[in-house]
Structure formats: structure tokens, C-alpha cells
Amino acid sequence: MNEPRIRFENAAKSYGSLTVLDNPETACNEKVMNEPMVRFENVTKRYGALTVLDELNLDIARNEKVCIIGPSGSGKTTVLRMLMTLEQIQGGVIWVDGEPLTHMQKNGHLVPASDRHLRRVRSKIGMVFQHFNLFPHMTALQNCMEAPVSVLGLPKKQAEERAAELLDMVGLSDKRNHFPIQLSGGQKQRVAIARALAMRPKVMLFDEVTSALDPELIGEVLNVIRKLGAEHDLTMLMVTHQMGFAKEFSDRVCFFYGGKIVEQGPPDQLLGNPQNERTRQFLSAVLEAR
Amino acid sequence: MSKWDWSYVWEALPYLYRGAIVTVQATVLSFAIALVLGLIIALIRQSPNRYVSTAMTEVVEFIRSTPLLLQVFFVYFVGPQFGILIPAWTAGISMLGIHYAAYCSEVYRAGILAVEEGQWEACTALNLSRIRTWRTIILPQAIPPIVPALGNYFVGMFKETPILAAIAILEMLQQAKIFGANNYRYTEAIVMVGFFFLVFSLAASAIVQSVSIWLNRRYRLQ
Ligand SMILES: Nc1ncnc2c1ncn2[C@@H]1O[C@H](COP(=O)(O)OP(=O)(O)OP(=O)(O)O)[C@@H](O)[C@H]1O
Ligand SMILES: [Mg+2]
């Protein structure tokens, strides 16, 4: 338990400082790059007596694209929500970019994080929701400007430029001044993606972002995600039922069952030639449903 | 003596005019207190601290389950026994305001609870501060739909103002009574007060409705 803590702390120190040589232990920028971007370490999540995730261990590398698949109720959403700090965890530690997320280091111990610590680490993470959760009383542009202005303290003009640029990137430059109610589902979801990106996160979470969309609108959202993956340094963690997309897009697919990762591996292998019986059952059920 | 005499109407007017001003002032001031305090109470009840929110809920329950008149008497007549001297006007306005703040807080609460959970989650995901979340995301969605309900209390409080007569505040009905007693003639004055209440209520409802429409349009809520 103590070992990784020390390693992370030194790694963090070596970030800003160039005089790493006087401390042999921290001469390891390379090591920083090898640290996972996200690490779940024995993370346990319970709702009352129901244990939803039991001692989850999962490392996600920098820039890695990971898809999470699995049957309903297997804990996929919970994994993302814990990382977004929307759920408290009952055991273990989540690390983000070398720092504990829900804890902080104090005199060599991990103590529950202060609000300030939580907000600082959380700023590295962005999330897109199944039901968009756009602010209905704000235009697309205002949706994308709110957090940069109020959290990052960006001047209005600069925030507006950034928002416009992002809306451009998701193909909605002509919808800037539209309210969510005036947009289609696919458009709403693209605004939601732009809104999350406006905070310049290092990790992006996508929870079944196409599940609430009409079939003909799914493509436009997946295209945006594809583009994101190709053009930006982003670690992406994505719950999806789009097996085709998972196969082509991700570096790794994790199959969840009953709160555990039952099988994981490169998409071709996991989707093409699954080893576990549960995985096989799940995949054939999904294919049949087509 | 005829049943209706216009000369009494003219004579009563100055009295009623003075009374009407007091009534309108009392209503507007105590409604302002109810609106602000009600919101504060509703926010305190949303506090993550269990003890704080429970205590606030109990206070609201207490205020709602005792009569307004009793509360006004308590502050005005019992207060001085403990050395707390509050002028009638202050006592009346603030008790009316506090009493209705308890009701308004329930309305605010309903509005707040009606905002989708996903809005809070989006605010967390975007790292908005608590204050910012309330001010720019939650309240702009929570308040416009409840304006009509708050407006009902506005009209309700207006009709409740005659209670202030009990601590010798010369609101409209009290003025009518004094006029009646002085002239041995109540009909005109009382009817006029009724008429005024009716007109004011209609005007207040119209104001509330336009505020509601304006707010809903401003915030694009249906
Ligand atoms: N707030 C909650 N209270 C109690 N139990 C919950 C709560 N949220 C989720 N659960 C339970 O936790 C388990 C995992 O839920 P989760 O939402 O992570 O599943 P999922 O894999 O995302 O499923 P789906 O594919 O249906 O979205 C389920 O058994 C669910 O009933
Ligand atoms: Mg889910």
C-alpha cells in the first residue's frame, strides 16, 4: 500500500522542476509518462448492503481509449460516476494523473480530500452524459462559456472564442445562439461534448452518449468522438453498446459483469475471439438484438 | 335614511385612502421579506448538514402550525415583558413576512426539487462552485415555474393584512371601522373596502402573471 504512494509523490514533484538530478529518485520524467492517467486501486462501491463494485483494479494509460461494455446493472456507469466524483467510494483509492482523487496526502497518510483538492483534481476530468444535461436556459454558446468563465476565470471574450471554436469543431457553428430545446438530440450531445472540452480536460468520460438518440443521429456524434480521439491528446473512457465503434475506436475493451472486469483486451481479440463464457454470451445476445 | 348614500362615500374616501396606503405598504414590504427569507430558508433546508436542515424544517413546521395572529400578539405583547420593545409597524410587518416566508420556502423547495438531478451532475462535472451552481444554474430553472404559486401568497398576504388592526395598525379595514363608528354608518365604507380588495387582488394577479410569462420566456422554460 505504501509503495505506490511514494512513487507518485516524487513523480509529481518532478513535473515542474528542472533540477531533477539532485534527487536521484525523481530523475524520472519518463516514469511520469509511464504512470497511468487513471488508476482504480481496490475500489469498492456499495449502495447500502448492495456491493456494486468489489475491489476494482483498473489502469488506464495516457491517451488510451478504453471502451467498457457489459450487461445492464454490471456497474459500468458507476465506474465513470466514481471517477467524476458523482459517487462516493467506500474503499480503495482512485488516482488521476499521479494524484489521489478522493483523498489527499497529509504527513504520508491518505486522508479524505478537501473540497479544494477535489476541485483541482476533478478539473482534469470531463464527462458527457447519456441525457446531455445541457443547461436549458442558456444558448449553446453560453453552455460552453459558463464553466470557463466562472471556474477558470477566463475573460468573456476569450471564453466566447474558445466556445465558438469548439462548436465549430463539433459542426455546430450555425447553432451557437440556439437553446437546447431548439436542437436535435445529436446536436445537443455535440454541444455537451463541446461544453466538456471547453474546460480542457485530460480525461473524457462518455456514458452511453448515443443511447438516447434516434439511430440516424448516432453517426454524427460518433464522428465527433472519433475526431477527438484522432486530433487531441485525450484519455477516453467510454461506456457503449456500439460494438462496431468500440472495435474500430478503442485500444482496449473491458467487459464488466456483476461489478467485476471479467475479461479485457484489444478489441479485435475481445470482440472477435472472447475467451470467457460470459463475454461470449453477452456478445451473442447483443448481436442477436440487432 | 337611504340604503346607499353617496355623500358618505366621499366622506369616507380620505380615511380609506390613508388605510389603503398602509395596507399596500404592509403587503409589499412583508411580501419582500417573505420572498427573500423564504429563499434563504429553502437554501438552508438543502444544506448537506443533516442537523441544520432538520432544524430548519422544524422551525418552518412550527411557524406554519401556529396562527399568524398569535405570532403577532406574541411579538408585540409578550416581547415587552422580556424587555424587547418592538414598534407595532415593525412587529406586524416582520411577523407577516416571517409567517409567509415559511410558506414560500415550501414553494421554493418544490421548485428546487423539480430541477433535474442531471443539472447538478453537469455542474459537478464542470467543476462549478456551489454558489455559482445555485445562482446561475439551479435557481434560474427553479424559480420561473413557481412564480404563480408565490404570487398566490402575495394576494393571500394582502387579504391577511386586516390582522394588523389587532395591534393598532390603521390599515384599510380598521379605517373603515373607525369611520363607521364615528358616523354610525358602515355600509359605504365597508363596501368600498371590499371593492378595493377586489381591484387590488385582480391587479396583483395580473402583475404576477406577466412576471411569470416574462421570466419563463427569458429563461426559455415552458
Ligand atoms: N443510486 C443508487 N442506489 C442504489 N443502487 C444503485 C444506484 N445506482 C446504481 N445502483 C445499482 O448499482 C448497480 C450498477 O449500476 P450501473 O448504473 O453502474 O449499471 P450499468 O452497468 O451502467 O447499467 P446500464 O447498462 O443499465 O446503464 C445496479 O445494480 C444498480 O441497480
Ligand atoms: Mg449505465
Image (tube, coloured by chain):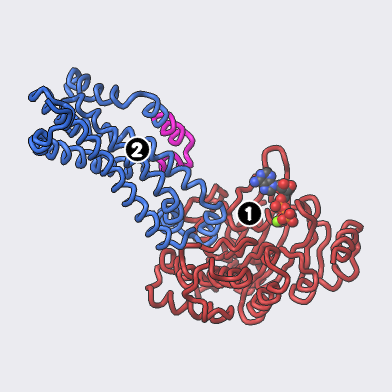
Chain colours: A red, B blue
Regarding residue A203, the answer to whether it shows in the image is: yes
Mark 2: which amino acid?
Ala
Instruction: Identify whether B151 is placed above or below B122.
Output: above
Task: In this rendered view, identify the residue nearer to me: A158 or A113.
Answer: A158
- Whole-percent x, y for residue A177 in the image: 47, 74
Mark 1: which amino acid?
Met
Let me know if residue A235 is in the magenta part: no
Residue linked to disc 2: B101
Chain letter of the residue carrying label 2:
B
Q: Which residue reaches farthest top?
A: B81
Q: CA distance from mark 2 to mark 1?
A: 38 Å
Q: Which residues are magenta?
A: B42-59
Q: Are marks 2 and 1 in contact (CB under 8 Å)?
A: no
Left or right for A216, reference A121: right
Residues behind callouts 2 and 1 on a single chain: no
Q: Residues within 10 Å of mark 1 (few under 14, many from 20)?
A: some
- Whole-percent x, y for residue B176 in the image: 15, 30
Residue linked to disc 1: A82
Let me know if residue B58 is in the magenta part: yes
